[in-house]
Each structure stands twice: as structure tokens, then as C-alpha cells.
Image (cartoon, rainbow, N blue to C red):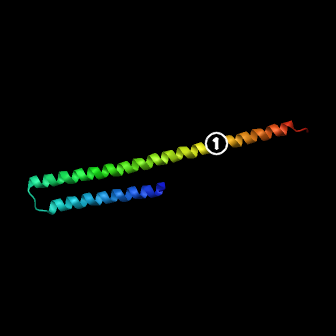
Amino acid sequence: MDNEQQGGSAAVGLAFLQGAVIGAIGALLLAPRSGREFRKQIKGYAQQTGEKLRTVAGNGQDALQHGMEEGRHLAEKGRQILREAAEAGQSAIKQERGRPS
């Protein structure tokens, strides 16, 4: 999965959580319950939402870690290409200097 897809997935996950929280609050406010039941239900929804947020945050952290590793790999590959180009240039200079004029 590329970074653009991961970012889109995270946005969809956050939108889903926002909708779930708004829906839960609406349901709680409109449902006839005693104060104790209401508080217990709010606590349950808060715990579920916290767990979902931790999951989304973990997924985002995994995506960031993957992106950083990919960046390191590309940087190392670029350094290797530059080293090879420099060595080839130095070799060509040495060959030209060794040729009679």
C-alpha cells in the first residue's frame, strides 16, 4: 500500500470514528435512561472510542515508520549511485591524463 492510500485510509478511519461518536452521543441523549445507566453507557462508549483511536494512531505510526524506512532506502540507493558516478568520473579523468597528447 503506498503512502497516498495509507493517508486516505487514515482519513476514512477518522471520519468513521467522528460519525460513530456523534451518533453515539445523539443516541445517548435521545434514549430514556436513568443517570447511572447513562453514565455507564457513556463510559463504555468512551472506552470503545479510545480503543479505536489507539488502533488508528498505531496504524498511522506504522505508516510513518514504513515511509521513513523507504526514504532511508532511497537515500542510500542515491548515495550509491553518486559514489559509482564519481568513481567512473575519476577513472575517466585518469585515463585521459594517461593518454599522450
x and y, in percent, of residue 24 in the image: 22, 59
x and y, in percent, of residue 85 in the image: 70, 43
Where 19 sits versus 54, above or below?
Answer: below
Identified by mark 1, the residue type is Gln
In which quadrant will I find the C terminus? Answer: top right
Using a 10 Å C-alpha cutoff, classify the residue at mark 1 as few (fewer than 14 neighbours), some (14 to 19) or many (20 or more): few
Say which element carries label 1.
helix
| Residue drawn at point x = 23 percent, y = 50 percent | 47
x and y, in percent, of residue 34 in the image: 8, 56
| Residue drawn at point x = 27 percent, y = 59 percent | 20
Location of residue 21 (image quadrant): bottom left
Q: Would residue 77 be found to the left or right of residue 69 on screen?
A: right
Of residues 72 and 17, the one drawn nearer to the viewer in this rendering? 72
| Residue drawn at point x = 9 percent, y = 52 percent | 36
Name the residue tied to disc 1.
80
Q: Would residue 62 be found to the left or right of residue 100 on screen?
A: left
Where 34 sits versus 70, above or below?
Answer: below
Q: Would residue 59 be found to the left or right of residue 67 on screen?
A: left
